[in-house]
Image (spheres, rainbow, N blue to C red):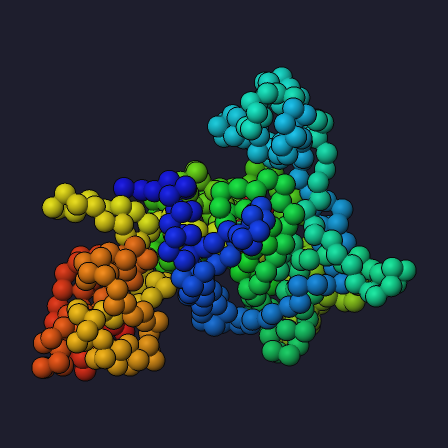
Amino acid sequence: MAKTMEEIVAHCKNTGFIFPGSEIYGGLANSWDYGPLGVELKNNIKKLWWEKFVQKRENSFGIDCAILMNPRVWEASGHVASFSDPLVDCKECKARFRADNLISDFSKGEVNPDLMTREEMSKYLSDNHVPCPVCKKSNFTPIREFNLLFQTHRGVTKESQQDIYLRPETAQGEYVNFLNVQRTMRAKVPFGIGQIGKAFRNEITPGNFTFRQIEFEQMEYQWFCHEGEDEKYYEEFKKASKDFFLSLGIGEDKLRFHDHDKLAFYAKAACDLQFLFPFGWDEVNGIHNRTNYDLSRHQEFSGKAMQYLDPITNEKFIPFVIENSYGLDRAILAVICNSYETEKLEDGEEREIMRIIPKLAPFKVAVLPLMKKDLSEKAKELFSKLSQSFRTIYDDTGSIGKRYRRQDQIGTPLCVTVDYETLENQTVTVRDRDTMAQIRLPISELEGYISKIVNG
Ligand code: ATP
């Protein structure tokens, strides 16, 4: 049985995946903290992504750029001038919304606001008496542009202060370092640069748990290639993005591509990969053929040549870029939504389970002494041994049945139980999360067995 968003949020909070940000102060809208389980899941997803795009791909390199960049970067990228959403306020209850979201929600996706001008959006809201989702009245202010950049200042005195921005995406760090990476790695086009890091957007409407936050993490990969090969690589990276989400254990039926209806004037193609969240299909990743726009703009604004000299043809040119932009938090949320369910057992009972694939599970194995009194010493010894190789959890509180259920709830694929027989013959029982089947194994074979399950 699939879960609702409310159940997912409650589960994440109660089990230690995700807590509301600064909760004891009443929270901060749209900010979330990853707990002990969430941070493990997050690190496991980052690792898979880094391996797939940076480590295992030929001609691929990683970087880790500063969050604060020279403000000219954001002028060149267009973010200062036009990284904005259409904002409206409800005149009755003062709630604030994105006009485009109001329209697509009201029309249940039938009307695409991306194809509308701001005037057309305003007209649609009033012609259709679109109600405010909070107070249900229909009385909105005219649309205003709301820039999503978080602005801050550097410098000690007021006079010497300079306005700077928290980066709204990680991609620009990859563009401005294009020639640094190319030169130091002696890279030949085509090659790629990836990075994982925080991004910040002053989103108007919070919503849907970690799906839309003001501070989030991106995994972005830019592929620099020759014009003429761009379409081939665009298709290749579309496939790679779907393969990546399939490798997180997400079913094909919960993934689909959505081509952008309206392209930026410089873009040749753009699509999103969408996941079927409990609140509907929505974007987890974007793939864009950005032509040579970004590097050309940085050449223009910095006055530094961003050209690549082809060592074979001696041709100098600015490469095309295929941008692959993954939201780490959305990938985590997709994995959680995909794996958390209530299962009806044959005996009529129910159990809560997270069917996270073992590679991503926060804990790979739980060590449980059947009786705390006589068996905890042996179990702790086993915990110390296994925790050198696998993220392991020890639990000796409550009945063994309850402890199994606790591990099912957080997605631990294996439970190892130390019982009286263990003291006699150095064997343990190993319980599988999904089938609940138990086998008996010598302790000496345990690491090999767990390894097979985790890496399988
Ligand atoms: P949306 O249309 O949902 O606002 P976007 O098209 O602005 O997203 P991009 O600029 O393409 O998003 O960003 C790349 C990726 O970063 C997205 O696919 C998404 O996974 C993630 N992302 C963007 N904004 C947020 C946010 N506010 N919170 C969490 N993740 C985000």
Q: Name the quadrant containing residue 392.
A: bottom left
Whether residue 396 is visible: yes
Depth check: give the residue in front, 270 or 376. Answer: 376
Above or below for 210 versus 123: below
Q: Residue furthest right?
A: 159
Image coords of residue 29 (percent x, y): 58, 46
Above or below for 380 versus 264: below
Depth check: give the residue in front, 38 or 16. Answer: 16
Above or below for 127 versus 430: above
State which quarter of the image contains the C terminus. Answer: bottom left
Whether residue 120 is visible: no
Q: Residue furthest front?
A: 373
Image coords of residue 295 (percent x, y): 70, 60
Image coords of residue 425 (percent x, y): 10, 82
Q: Name the quadrant containing residue 7.
A: top left
Left or right of 329? Residue 10 is: left
Number of marks in the image? Answer: 0
User: Which residue is painted at 68% across and 46% down in the image?
Assistant: 148
Left or right of 115? Residue 23 is: left
User: Which residue is painted at 33% across and 74% down in the image?
Assistant: 390
State which quarter of the image contains the N terminus. Answer: top left
Left or right of 173? Residue 21 is: left
User: Which residue is painted at 22% across and 75% down in the image?
Assistant: 376
User: Which residue is painted at 43% across and 63% down in the image?
Assistant: 36
